[in-house]
Image: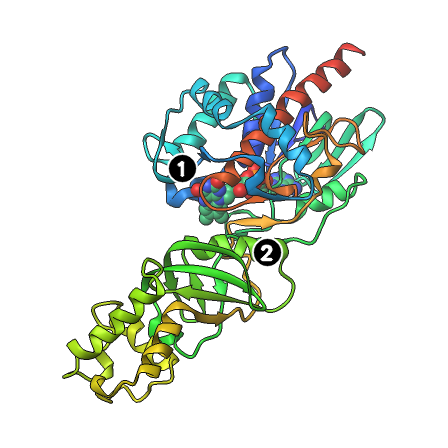
């Protein structure tokens, strides 16, 4: 660790040593030219969040990552960023620092060795080869312009730089270093920031059945309803918690909820999406005959987890379940089919930052140039990653944004600092 005793001077200061900051520092360092570059991170080590990504495997990008799959205030600028650095440019960037990747299902790309730590190691080894300083345990507390330089305050002392890259991330996952300090820093240099919301997280819901479903995973098509209108849907595994629904499909819905919904909303589960209505009706009629010797308690056992089946029947108003299957009327079967198709869970509150993977909202992308990530308000200031108002769904899309914006910011900050240094 570097200890700053007096003023620390550098050509390029990268504030934040997460995915975007490390990519920016490597990209700047690889431009050569002998400029000094330093990464400052508040945590004891850089890349803490990166280590937790993809359940420790780091889903570092997705073949389908392109501007239309992200939420942002400026799609045009986002297009410029991705035309500057796209998925294959990113894979080449990693290959050039010694990281080999492998594509898995749904276009998800992971390091071949299956370790998030390898991504961090290769980035840090490259920083070390390039002579980039990593200054950890150093929160940049304030920043101001003084002539052609930026002056920053930190507990370790003052830092001056020709160019600054803000790569402070967002509020998501505070236990992994998520903070809102980046918004304050850019605001102090004339920028704005939008409301931020947790995204890619479990959704808190209301249901009398959740306590008996806790811990169960089931396949379903999940839709997010605003009022009665579906605004997003996805199919896959849903996980029931005692006060929330979780799983990747719910994370994807939380992203839509964070991006746009202000009123009441609900999650609706189709528990047998593969069966058209007529087939579902025939299945229930056949079971009424086949299982006529049983009580309702087991009417849906063998189709769903037993506890899920019992809750569906209760939700259809068929308690007590000690009644015989043979006594089910046609309208009872219709009610059961209706609940299987549309099992509704009203969203009961705000998702928590602790369980969120990303931040929706942030510093408007429109305030930065998508070709260079340079501020439109403050020359020499650049930004990258989650601190900006760009977020995507699960599957490697958020890290791709961090890499694309970070690499562009690093290269452009290098050009900016080099021209200042040459002009002296
Ligand atoms: C559990 C989890 C799993 C995830 N899995 C995936 C995945 O598999 N694929 C994917 O695409 N995305 C995933 N994400 C999202 C992804 O990790 C983030 O989008 C990405 O890390 C954002 O990168 P960043 O550089 O913008 O911010 P961060 O990685 O959050 O880095 C910001 C850094 O800045 C530092 N910092 C902030 N303010 C200051 C300051 N003032 N001074 C000094 N340092 C400061 C912080 O300490 C932090 O280290 C996951 C997120 C979580 C929480």
Please tell me whether residue 18 is drawn above or below residue 362 in the rendered image.
above
Q: Quadrant of the N terminus?
A: top right
- Please give the residue where the numbered disc 1 appears in the rendered image: 108
Q: Nearer the viewer, residue 6 or 21?
A: 21
**Earlier residue among tags 1 and 2:** 1
Residue positioned 54% across, 31% down in the render: 403
Residue positioned 58% across, 36% down in the render: 67
- Please give the residue where the numbered disc 2 appears in the rendered image: 258
Q: Is mark 1 within 8 Å of ligand 1?
A: no
* For the residues bearing labels 1 and 2, Cβ distance under 8 angstroms: no
Please tell me whether residue 235 is drawn above or below residue 285 in the rendered image.
above
Residue 124 left/right relative to 338? right
Graded by Cα atoms within 10 Å as few (under 14), some (14 to 19) or many (20 or more), the crowding at tag 2 reads: many
Counting every numbered tag in the picture gives: 2
Q: Measuring from the top left, give residue 338's x and y in whole percent.
A: 39, 73
Residue positioned 60% across, 69% down in the render: 264
Q: Secondary structure at mark 2?
A: helix
């Amino acid at each position: 660790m570097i200890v700053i005793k007096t003023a620390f001077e550098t050509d390029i200061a990268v504030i934040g040593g997460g995915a975007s900051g490390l990519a920016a520092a490597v990209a700047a360092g690889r431009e050569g030219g002998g400029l000094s570059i330093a990464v400052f991170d508040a945590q004891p080590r850089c890349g803490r969040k990166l280590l937790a990504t993809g359940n420790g495997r780091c889903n570092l990008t997705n073949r389908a990552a392109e501007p239309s799959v992200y939420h942002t205030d400026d799609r045009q600028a986002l297009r410029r960023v991705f035309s500057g650095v796209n998925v294959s440019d990113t894979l080449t960037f990693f290959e050039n620092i010694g990281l080999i990747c492998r594509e898995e299902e749904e276009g998800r790309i992971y390091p071949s060795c299956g370790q998030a730590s390898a991504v961090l190691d290769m980035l840090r080894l490259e920083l070390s080869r390039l002579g980039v300083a990593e200054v950890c345990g150093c929160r940049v507390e304030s920043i101001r312009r003084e002539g052609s330089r930026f002056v920053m305050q930190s507990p370790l002392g003052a830092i001056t730089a020709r160019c600054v890259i803000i790569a402070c991330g967002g509020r998501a996952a505070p236990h992994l270093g998520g903070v809102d300090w980046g918004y304050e820093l850019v605001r102090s240099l004339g920028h704005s920031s939008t409301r931020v919301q947790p995204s890619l997280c479990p959704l808190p819901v209301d249901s009398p059945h959740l306590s008996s479903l806790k811990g169960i995973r089931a396949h379903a098509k999940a839709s997010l309803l605003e009022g009665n209108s579906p605004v997003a849907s996805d199919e896959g595994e849903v996980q029931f918690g005692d006060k929330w629904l979780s799983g990747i499909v719910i994370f994807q819905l939380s992203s839509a909820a964070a991006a746009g919904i202000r009123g009441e909303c609900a999650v609706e589960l189709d528990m047998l999406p593969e069966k058209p209505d007529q087939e579902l009706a025939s299945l229930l009629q056949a079971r009424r005959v086949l299982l006529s010797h049983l009580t309702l308690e087991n009417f849906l056992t063998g189709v769903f987890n037993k506890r899920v089946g019992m809750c569906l029947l209760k939700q259809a108003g068929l308690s007590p379940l000690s009644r015989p299957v043979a006594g089910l009327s046609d309208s009872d079967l219709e009610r059961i089919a209706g609940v299987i198709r549309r099992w509704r869970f009203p969203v009961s509150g705000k998702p928590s930052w602790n369980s969120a993977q990303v931040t929706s909202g942030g510093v408007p992308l429109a305030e930065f140039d998508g070709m260079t990530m340079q501020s439109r308000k403050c020359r020499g200031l650049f930004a990258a990653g989650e601190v900006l108002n760009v977020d995507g769904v699960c599957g490697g899309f958020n890290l791709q944004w961090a890499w694309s914006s970070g690499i562009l910011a690093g290269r452009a900050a290098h050009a900016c600092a080099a021209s200042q240094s040459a002009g002296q």
